[in-house]
Amino acid sequence: MTTPDLRRTLHASLDRRVRPEDLLTPITQLMADQLSPADRQRLLKAQRQARGAASSHWSSMPADFRRPAAPNLQVAGALFAAPLPPTDEPGVVAQLGQYLGQASAEIHKQVGESDFQRDRLNRDARAAAGLDLSRRQYNKRFRLVQRLERKQATLARELEKRALTLISKSRLASELPFSVFARDDASAAFIAYYTARCHVRSEFTNTAQVRPYDGVADLLFRHCRRAATTNWWAIAHVYPDPEVLRHLSEAQKGQLLGRCCAVLERTATLMQEVWARSTFDRDTMIVRRGNDSSTWNLLAGAWNQARDGWMNLLYALDLDELLDAVCPGKAMRLMAADVAWWHQHSGGQLDPNTQVWARLPLPWTVLAGEAPCTRRTVRQLCLDLGLHPEQSGWIAPRTRARVAPFRLTPELVHGVTVSSPGLARVLRRAGVFSGRPLRQVADDTLGTDQAE
């Protein structure tokens, strides 16, 4: 591939779930003239390790986060004169809204959800409006616009959830435009690889998850540290480490701070909605039947990532005194009951972070000014529970984690590692590890999967 193609490939991975090892080849090719012989050998060694693995050719796991599909407008195109909007572009929700506004105007319907019984035009009103439509044809159009309005609202909500899912994994990496991402090849290589590491799925374990900053990420970051052309502004979108933020101007730090605050605000609103319609056990945060754990966990992840970035930027801007007035806490994810049992059965205790969360005001109430929560309050509570308030990230930027060893992405079925992609697909189809009754799987399933 040419250099522009390599940059496009790496940029396209930012909002997908590409395996980190699949980016090693384009990264090595992109940085061929910049790597030292020792660093090139380390990357080539990682590539050989990936090629030698049985699962290196394909995976049963999706290589993308779920993308909500826009509604089918084929019927609408036959009934309304308004030109159909493109449904495969980033502004699909706004374009769909504009189209529905035009379609509503054609039948003299108010924009937005309307009551089918109360808001339809009768025969005289249709004639006065110049609508040459029978009741049946008018009702057909009215119902169609109503359905599309509901689908537009659902699409907007699902797209927002997808955006927050990406933020919960890799902060603002997916929002980096190509023009910014491609300014420096070494920076682009680090951003793409580290983002892919952040997107690796969590594993079913009673210990800590593997940290995304591994040996390859460290190699690429050390190269950025030595280079004179490093794009620190782009790197700060995914890795707002204090060392990275020191390279930014005050204006850039302020811009990132504003974006983190915007994420906190929109996430807090959604968290409050999920909390209000749920019955979470705040003392343990163990999931129970009826809890919307998937939505809550992605919102909690987005909140924590934005909060970490916000905290780092406050300290980088010398504005950490604001925490003396407002210091919203972290949000704890819901834990599966079997993981909690496994953890306790193996001698573990309730995470002190969960105890801090349970005793602090809910984050959205603090953000809205409805409940007081200061740095002094959080510090004292952490100390009372035996938790270091700074190192745990409750009142200060997290300390940089140790470099994790390079490791191939495991093949997972509901978080459980299996030996091969073919076996993983069979187990997934049968419902193994899902907590649900097993399903019958065709005898030739394994052979079909292997053939694929």
Image (tube, rainbow, N blue to C red):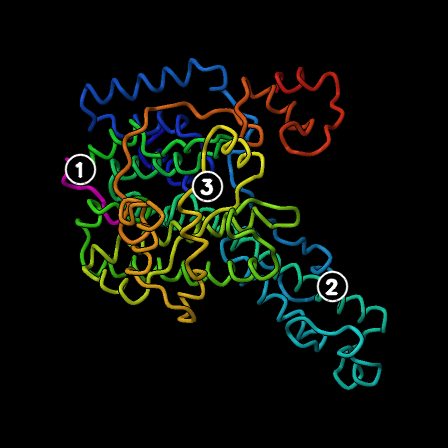
**For marks 2 and 3 on the same chain, the one whose residue lies earlier in the sequence:** 2
Counting from the top left corner in percent of width and height, residue 313 is at 26, 55
In the picture, measured across the screen, residue 77 lies left or right of residue 93, that is: right
Looking at the figure, which quarter contains the N terminus? top left
In the picture, measured across the screen, residue 250 lies left or right of residue 415, that is: left
Image quarter for residue 13? top left
The structure residue drawn at horizontal position 69% and vertical position 26%, both measured from the top left corner, is 430
Secondary element under disc 2, as helix, strand or loop, is: helix
**Marks 1/3: CA–CA distance:** 39 Å
> What mark, if any, has residue 85 been given in the picture?
none
Instruction: In the rendered view, tell whether residue 48 sits above or below residue 141.
Output: above
Most common secondary structure along the magenta stretch: loop
Front residue of this view, candidates 442 and 81 = 442
Instruction: In the rendered view, tell whether residue 214 sits above or below residue 73.
Output: above
Residue found at the far front of this picture: 384
**For marks 1 and 3 on the same chain, the one whose residue lies earlier in the sequence:** 1
Counting from the top left corner in percent of width and height, residue 158 is at 57, 53
Choose mark 2 or mark 1, whichever is in front.
Answer: 1
* Mark 2: amino acid: Leu
Looking at the figure, which quarter contains the C terminus? top right
Q: Which residue is mark 1?
A: 225
Q: Which residue is mark 3?
A: 350
Secondary element under disc 1, as helix, strand or loop, is: helix
Q: Which residue is mark 2?
A: 144
The structure residue drawn at horizontal position 43% and vertical position 60%, both measured from the top left corner, is 363
**For marks 2 and 1 on the same chain, the one whose residue lies earlier in the sequence:** 2
